[in-house]
Image: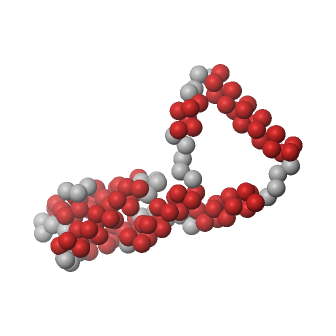
Amino acid sequence: LKQVIPLMNSKFSDVSALCLDCVEQLFRIDKDGEATLEVLQLIADYIRKNDCMLNGGMIEIMKVIRLSDDLTRKLLQAEEDDSVHLSRKEKQRRANEKRRKRDAALREGRDVDYHLGTATQGVKEKMKIQTKIIEGM
Protein backbone atom coordinates (compact mmCIF):
# COMPACT_ATOMS: atom_id res chain seq x y z
CA LEU A 1 0.00 0.00 0.00
CA LYS A 2 2.86 2.37 0.73
CA GLN A 3 3.93 2.04 -2.90
CA VAL A 4 0.43 2.34 -4.38
CA ILE A 5 -0.66 5.55 -2.64
CA PRO A 6 1.91 7.87 -4.34
CA LEU A 7 1.16 6.25 -7.70
CA MET A 8 -2.52 7.14 -7.34
CA ASN A 9 -1.45 10.75 -7.88
CA SER A 10 0.84 9.93 -10.81
CA LYS A 11 1.16 12.14 -13.91
CA PHE A 12 0.65 9.07 -16.06
CA SER A 13 -3.08 8.47 -16.36
CA ASP A 14 -2.76 4.71 -16.94
CA VAL A 15 -0.72 4.18 -13.79
CA SER A 16 -2.96 6.46 -11.77
CA ALA A 17 -6.14 4.75 -13.01
CA LEU A 18 -4.79 1.29 -12.21
CA CYS A 19 -3.81 2.29 -8.67
CA LEU A 20 -7.11 4.06 -8.07
CA ASP A 21 -8.99 0.98 -9.25
CA CYS A 22 -6.90 -1.20 -6.93
CA VAL A 23 -7.67 0.94 -3.88
CA GLU A 24 -11.33 1.23 -4.86
CA GLN A 25 -11.62 -2.56 -4.97
CA LEU A 26 -9.95 -2.75 -1.57
CA PHE A 27 -12.57 -0.35 -0.18
CA ARG A 28 -15.35 -2.49 -1.67
CA ILE A 29 -14.17 -5.78 -0.17
CA ASP A 30 -13.04 -4.47 3.21
CA LYS A 31 -15.78 -5.52 5.61
CA ASP A 32 -14.14 -4.59 8.92
CA GLY A 33 -12.78 -1.23 7.85
CA GLU A 34 -9.23 -1.85 9.04
CA ALA A 35 -7.67 -1.81 5.57
CA THR A 36 -9.73 1.25 4.65
CA LEU A 37 -8.48 3.03 7.75
CA GLU A 38 -4.88 2.14 6.90
CA VAL A 39 -5.25 3.46 3.34
CA LEU A 40 -6.78 6.73 4.55
CA GLN A 41 -3.96 7.19 7.04
CA LEU A 42 -1.38 6.55 4.31
CA ILE A 43 -3.10 9.07 2.02
CA ALA A 44 -3.12 11.67 4.80
CA ASP A 45 0.59 11.05 5.49
CA TYR A 46 1.37 11.33 1.76
CA ILE A 47 -0.43 14.67 1.53
CA ARG A 48 1.31 16.04 4.65
CA LYS A 49 4.79 14.97 3.54
CA ASN A 50 4.53 16.17 -0.04
CA ASP A 51 2.23 19.17 0.44
CA CYS A 52 0.61 18.35 -2.88
CA MET A 53 -2.63 18.65 -4.81
CA LEU A 54 -4.71 15.51 -5.12
CA ASN A 55 -5.85 13.80 -8.26
CA GLY A 56 -9.66 14.10 -8.52
CA GLY A 57 -9.90 10.32 -8.68
CA MET A 58 -8.48 10.05 -5.18
CA ILE A 59 -11.48 11.97 -3.89
CA GLU A 60 -13.94 10.05 -6.07
CA ILE A 61 -12.94 6.64 -4.71
CA MET A 62 -13.85 7.73 -1.20
CA LYS A 63 -17.51 7.48 -2.23
CA VAL A 64 -17.08 3.71 -2.14
CA ILE A 65 -16.12 3.56 1.55
CA ARG A 66 -18.70 1.63 3.55
CA LEU A 67 -20.09 3.25 6.65
CA SER A 68 -22.90 1.51 8.47
CA ASP A 69 -25.70 3.51 10.08
CA ASP A 70 -26.82 0.21 11.47
CA LEU A 71 -23.98 0.03 13.99
CA THR A 72 -25.39 2.74 16.22
CA ARG A 73 -28.71 0.93 16.37
CA LYS A 74 -26.96 -2.34 17.20
CA LEU A 75 -24.88 -0.62 19.87
CA LEU A 76 -27.96 0.89 21.50
CA GLN A 77 -29.74 -2.47 21.35
CA ALA A 78 -26.75 -4.24 22.91
CA GLU A 79 -26.60 -1.69 25.74
CA GLU A 80 -30.33 -2.05 26.30
CA ASP A 81 -30.04 -5.83 26.40
CA ASP A 82 -27.24 -5.57 28.96
CA SER A 83 -29.22 -3.24 31.18
CA VAL A 84 -32.26 -5.52 31.35
CA HIS A 85 -32.23 -7.78 34.40
CA LEU A 86 -32.52 -11.43 33.40
CA SER A 87 -34.35 -13.93 35.53
CA ARG A 88 -32.54 -16.99 36.78
CA LYS A 89 -34.56 -19.20 34.41
CA GLU A 90 -33.59 -17.05 31.42
CA LYS A 91 -29.90 -17.14 32.37
CA GLN A 92 -30.09 -20.92 32.75
CA ARG A 93 -31.88 -21.27 29.39
CA ARG A 94 -29.18 -19.19 27.63
CA ALA A 95 -26.39 -21.18 29.27
CA ASN A 96 -28.02 -24.47 28.24
CA GLU A 97 -28.46 -23.21 24.67
CA LYS A 98 -24.81 -22.20 24.50
CA ARG A 99 -23.70 -25.54 25.92
CA ARG A 100 -25.96 -27.41 23.45
CA LYS A 101 -24.45 -25.53 20.49
CA ARG A 102 -20.92 -26.20 21.71
CA ASP A 103 -21.64 -29.92 22.18
CA ALA A 104 -23.17 -30.13 18.69
CA ALA A 105 -20.06 -28.50 17.22
CA LEU A 106 -17.82 -30.97 19.05
CA ARG A 107 -19.90 -33.92 17.78
CA GLU A 108 -19.48 -32.64 14.22
CA GLY A 109 -15.74 -32.54 14.76
CA ARG A 110 -15.40 -28.78 14.56
CA ASP A 111 -12.78 -27.17 16.73
CA VAL A 112 -14.78 -25.01 19.13
CA ASP A 113 -11.77 -23.01 20.32
CA TYR A 114 -10.95 -22.10 16.73
CA HIS A 115 -14.44 -20.73 16.14
CA LEU A 116 -14.35 -18.74 19.36
CA GLY A 117 -10.99 -17.25 18.36
CA THR A 118 -12.22 -16.15 14.94
CA ALA A 119 -15.37 -14.45 16.18
CA THR A 120 -16.29 -11.22 14.47
CA GLN A 121 -15.51 -7.89 16.00
CA GLY A 122 -17.91 -6.45 18.48
CA VAL A 123 -20.15 -3.56 17.60
CA LYS A 124 -18.15 -1.12 19.74
CA GLU A 125 -14.90 -2.04 17.95
CA LYS A 126 -16.50 -1.51 14.55
CA MET A 127 -17.84 1.86 15.70
CA LYS A 128 -14.33 2.92 16.74
CA ILE A 129 -12.92 1.96 13.34
CA GLN A 130 -15.68 3.82 11.51
CA THR A 131 -15.11 6.89 13.65
CA LYS A 132 -11.41 6.83 12.76
CA ILE A 133 -12.29 6.42 9.06
CA ILE A 134 -14.55 9.46 9.17
CA GLU A 135 -11.89 11.48 11.01
CA GLY A 136 -9.35 10.44 8.37
CA MET A 137 -11.51 11.74 5.55
Q: In this rendering, would 47 be left or right of 99?
A: left
Residue 111: image location, x then y, percent: 56, 27
> Residue 131, image x and y in percent?
48, 68
Q: Residue at x 58, y 57 (%)?
A: 123
In the picture provided, is 118 more to the left or to the right than 74? Answer: left
| Residue that appears at 30% across and 58% down | 23
Give the vertical position of 104 relative to 82 (above or below). above
Residue 28, image x and y in percent? 40, 57
Asked whether, in this view, residue 79 is left or right of residue 87, the answer is left
Kindly give the residue lying farthest to the left in the view shown.
12
All told, the count of numbered labels is 0
Quadrant of residue 105 within the rendered picture: top right
Q: In the image, is residue 130 above or below residue 98?
A: below
Residue 16 visible, this angle: no
Residue at 26% x, 68% y is 45
- Residue at image coords 73%, 31%: 100
Can residue 11 be seen here? The reply is yes
As drawn, 70 above or below 118: below
Q: Quadrant of the C terminus?
A: bottom left
Image quadrant containing the N terminus: bottom left
Please determine whether, in this image, residue 134 is positioned above or below residue 115: below
Q: Is residue 130 left or right of residue 90?
A: left
